[in-house]
Image: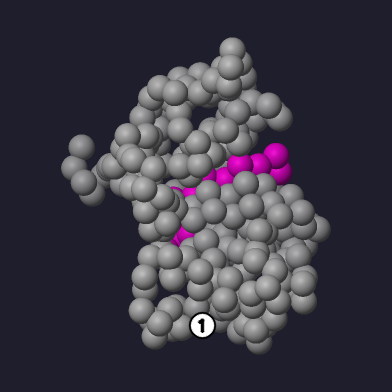
């Protein structure tokens, strides 16, 4: 496989158990740069555990996870943290913005973590604020923003450092349908523009519909 055609993310026979309970059972799939994949399945099928493994929050017991060809499952804790900071962005159902920081400051955090110089940080934060339509709200605290605005800030924060992989866990689960539709449109446009691979965990048909394909989990296994 040449480097050009190597997938952004490759999951190879990943299994994970908690005690005697096998939560993931030989899960395999790949995601190309710019591809959106919906991870669907009933509650308890292993979606969140898989997302945690993809994000480096959890480690698989067996199998391989490769991000841009690099084995995440073999990295030391420090190296894994570095890879996560540089290469992965995450969007959650409940936004997870820092309440004492403004919208702009929340977005800037990933750039500080990877030591982007201050001038470039400002440029990139301003550009992405304009892109998500929140330039006028740059100095607002999360408590002063609507749910839809908070999720837009969260998406900007997840993409500002130009990750290879964006993980989204029910990103519209806490929003009304109009705001949810706006967020899905933004995710689709931004991942097209940035060629970021997206893995989207969702129960929502609308959210799955923005993806190029679905990976369905049942009882920890991929089912077609």
**Numbered disc 1: secondary structure:** helix
The answer to whether residue 43 shows anywhere in this view is yes
**Badge 1: residue crowd in 10 Å (few <14, some 14–19, many ≥20):** some
Q: In this orientation, which residue lies closer to the viewer: 98 or 7?
A: 98
Q: In this orientation, which residue lies closer to the viewer: 85 or 172?
A: 85
For residue 113, above or below residue 3: below
Specify the quadrant that holds the N terminus: top left
Left or right of 199: which side holds 112? left
Residue at (42, 57) in percent of width and height: 85
Reply yes or no: does residue 194 show up in magenta. yes
Left or right of 177: which side holds 109? left
Reply yes or no: does residue 116 show up in magenta. no
Image location (x, y in percent) of residue 76: 34, 40
Left or right of 193: which side holds 218? right
Image location (x, y in percent) of residue 88: 44, 53
Asked where in the image residue 18 lies, by quadrant, the reply is top right
Q: In this orientation, which residue lies closer to the viewer: 73 or 34?
A: 73
Residue at (57, 59) in percent of width and height: 187
Specify the quadrant that holds the C terminus: top right
Q: Which residue is mark 1?
A: 126
Residue at (54, 39) in percent of width and height: 51
């Amino acid at each position: 496989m040449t480097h050009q055609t190597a997938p952004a993310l490759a999951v190879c026979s990943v299994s994970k158990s908690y005690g005697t309970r096998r939560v993931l059972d030989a899960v395999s799939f790949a995601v190309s740069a710019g591809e959106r994949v919906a991870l669907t399945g009933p509650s308890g099928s292993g979606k969140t555990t898989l997302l945690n493994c993809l994000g480096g929050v959890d480690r698989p017991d067996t199998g391989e996870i490769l991000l841009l060809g690099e084995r995440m499952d073999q990295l030391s804790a420090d190296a894994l943290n570095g890879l996560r900071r540089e290469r992965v962005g995450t969007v959650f159902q409940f936004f997870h913005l820092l309440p004492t920081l403004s919208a702009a400051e929340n977005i800037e955090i990933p750039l500080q973590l990877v030591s982007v110089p201050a001038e470039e940080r400002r440029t990139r934060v301003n550009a992405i604020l304009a892109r998500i339509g929140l330039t006028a709200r740059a100095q607002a605290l999360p408590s002063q923003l609507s749910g839809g605005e908070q999720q837009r800030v969260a998406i900007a924060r997840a993409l500002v450092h130009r990750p290879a992989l964006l993980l989204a866990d029910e990103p519209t689960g806490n929003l009304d349908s109009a705001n949810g539709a706006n967020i899905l449109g933004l995710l689709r446009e931004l991942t097209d523009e940035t060629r970021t691979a997206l893995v989207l965990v969702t129960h929502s048909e609308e959210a799955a519909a923005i993806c190029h394909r679905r990976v369905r989990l049942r009882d920890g296994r991929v089912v077609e």
